[in-house]
Image (cartoon, grey):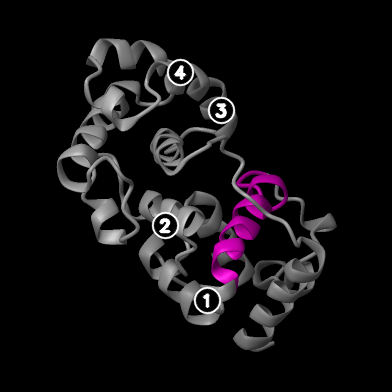
Amino acid sequence: MTLKQRYEGILGYFRDNVPIAESELHFASPYQLLVATILSAQCTDKRVNLTTPALFSAYPTPQALAEASFDDVLELIRSISYPNSKARHLIGMAQKLLADFGGEVPSDIDALMSLPGVGRKTANVVASITWRQPVIAVDTHVFRVSRRLGLSRGTTPRAVELDLEKHIPEDLRPIAHHWLILHGRYICTAQKPKCASCPLAQWCKDFASR
C-alpha cells in the first residue's frame, strides 16, 4: 500500500462516517478556548471542563484575568495538572493579550505563540478552531495515531505536523485534527488499543505488520 492510498483510505473513512468531529473542551469565545487549551496540556478535557466554569465566572474577560492574583487563580485550577505554572501562564497570557493585542485573541500562529503558556500545539488548536486556519495541532493522541497508522514517520510533533499538512488537503485539516484526536482517545489508545474493532485496521501500518 502506498502512502497516498493510506491517506485516501483513512481520510475517506472519516469523511464518510464521522462527518462531525469537534473539540470536547467547553468554551464560548476565543478567549475561553485559549484558556481551556492552556489548561488541557497534560490534563484530560473532562477535568478541564469541570474546572473552567468557576474560572470563567470569576474572570469572564482577559481584562479580569490580567488583574487576578496568583493565589486566587491557583485556588480555582488546583485540580488541574501543573496548577502553579498554569496559573502564572494564564495571568501572563491575559496581560500580554491586553498589552500587545488589545485584549483580542490573535489569529496568527507566531503571535499566539508569543503568549505565555502557548506552544505550537496550543496555538494550532486555537487557530484551527477559531479562525479555521489550515493547520493541524499535534498532541500526544495525534502523534501516536499518526505514527501507528503509518501517516508519518516523524519523531517529533513538529515533524508529524509537517507530514500531515503535506498530505491532508487544507479544507480537511481543521476536522482531521479532531478525527485523529478522537480516534486516539477512544480507539487507538496508548494502552491496549482496540485494534480488533478498529475501522481503520485495513490501512494501519502497525496492524499490517503483526
> Where does the N terminus fall, quadrant-wise?
bottom right
Q: Amino acid at mark 4?
A: Ser
Residue 63, image quadrant = top left
Question: In the drawing, does residue 74 fall left or right of residue 150?
Answer: left
Q: CA distance from mark 2 to mark 3?
A: 20 Å
- The residue indicated by pointer 3 is 49
Residue contact at pointers 2 and 3, CB within 8 angstroms: no
Seen in the image, is 179 located left or right of residue 37? right
As helix, strand or loop, the secondary structure at mark 3 comes to helix
Dominant secondary-structure state across the stretch colored magenta: helix
Alpha carbon of mark 2 to alpha carbon of mark 1: how far? Answer: 13 Å
* 3D distance between C-alphas at marks 4 and 1: 36 Å
Which comes sooner in the sequence, label 2 or label 3? 3
Disc on the earlier residue, 2 or 1:
2
Query: What's the magenta region?
Result: 172-191
Disc 1 marks which residue? 170
59 in relation to 26, above or below: above
On the image, the x and y values in percent for residue 184 come to 63, 52
| Element at label 1 | helix
In whole angstroms, how far apart are the C-alphas of marks 3 and 4? 13 Å
Question: Which is more toward the observer, 154 or 36?
Answer: 36
Q: Which residue is mark 2?
A: 127
Quadrant in which the C terminus is drawn: bottom right
Q: Earlier in the sequence, mark 4 or mark 1?
A: 4
Give the CA distance from mark 1 to mark 3: 29 Å
Question: What residue appears at the point 60 percent right and 71 percent down from the top-left corner?
Answer: 172
Seen in the picture, residue 107 relative to 43 is either above or below; the reply is below
Tell us which disc is closer to us: 3 or 4. 4
- x%, y% of residue 116? 23, 40
